[in-house]
Amino acid sequence: MATSHLLAGAASSSAAAAIRIRSPPPSSLRLNRRRPFQVVRAAEADAKETKPKAPEKAPAAGSSFNQLLGIKGAKQESDIWKIRLQLTKPVTWPPLVWGVLCGAAASGNFHWTVEDVAKSIVCMIMSGPCLTGYTQTINDWYDRDIDAINEPYRPIPSGAISENEVITQIWVLLLAGLGLGALLDLWAGHDFPIIFYLAIGGSLLSYIYSAPPLKLKQNGWIGNFALGASYIGLPWWAGQALFGTLTPDIIALTTLYSIAGFKYFLKDPVKYDVKYQASAQPFFVFGLLVTALATSH
């Protein structure tokens, strides 16, 4: 009898629970059921608010010196000629000038005469301001859409220089570099215009490094080798061809030096960029010169 009463009580409790479950929840519970969706939307809104935005203008503490060198932290400038110089990034010229010097030393035929010094200076102008300036300008041109997001205050995306002016600068620098290459071949009495063809090859390499569809800079190994060859191999070859003979062993040797530009041989090259540059560059550039002097004997 007691058992039957217990079973009946359990059944009635289950029924009541079922009724409670089926009955609509209070308004407070209904709000709680929708709250997770509100939390997600709030989190998304917070993420949008905290997402860093690209600066609309250059930092207030921009430097005129940085502007002339074409490096970060540059002051915004309205003078068109200063802007043109900024696009060529003069800070990138010295490695090319040094490469020409090493090539001239490696030839074993360079002498401290007015004519040889004049030849080497013209070769340095071809390699540095002209062809490296062309390379840097065309690189900024093809990066203009990315710079419009990340660095909209740079000369091209900010509109400080017009598109037609940029294109004109690219062509002027390219033709000036090729013209100086042809002039050096005539000056050196070359039967085959080797310096002119080196200038063409370097210009083509610079173009496919920056421009689609190849855009070698997007490929780690190939892009870094192309960059190393442009800054080390080609100017050395031009300097050596100007005063001597460019031989296969020199090409192989300078190719090895070009590989030294690979970032994959370093741990976190972006983070430790300044440290690596300061500690390695002196040994690297003097190593180039020692190698050049050694091969000249």
Image (cartoon, rainbow, N blue to C red):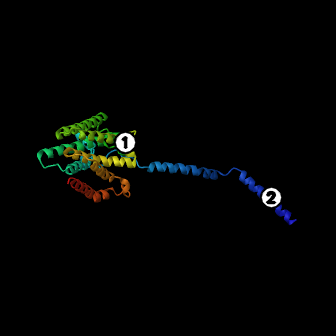
Q: Mark 1 points at which residue?
A: 148
Q: Where is residue 221 in the image (x, y as percent from the top left)?
A: 38, 49
Q: Is residue 166 left or right of residue 296?
A: right
Name the disc covering residue 71, or none: none
Q: How crowded is mark 2: few (under 14 residues within 10 Å), some or many (20 or more)?
A: few
Residue at left 30%, top 40%? 201
The residue lying toward the viewer, choosing from 24 and 158, is 158
Decide which of tag 1 and tag 2 comes sooner along the chain.
2
Q: Distance between the residues labelled 1 and 2?
A: 72 Å
Q: Mark 1: which amino acid? A: Ala
Helix or strand or loop: what does disc 2 sit on? helix
Is label 1 or label 2 in front?
1
Q: Which quadrant of the structure image shows residue 81?
A: top left
Q: Position of residue 78 (x, y in %)?
A: 25, 40
Q: Name the residue under label 2.
A: 11
Q: How many numbered marks does the figure carry? A: 2
Q: Where is residue 99 in the image (x, y as percent from the top left)?
A: 24, 49
The residue lying toward the viewer, choosing from 81 and 96, is 96
Q: Mark 2: which amino acid? A: Ala
In the rendered view of the protein, which quadrant contains the N terminus?
bottom right
In the rendered view of the protein, which quadrant contains the C terminus?
bottom left
Is 276 located above or below residue 124 in the figure? below
Q: Which quadrant of the structure image shows residue 283?
A: bottom left
Residue at left 38%, top 47%? 222
Q: Position of residue 179 (x, y in %)?
A: 22, 36
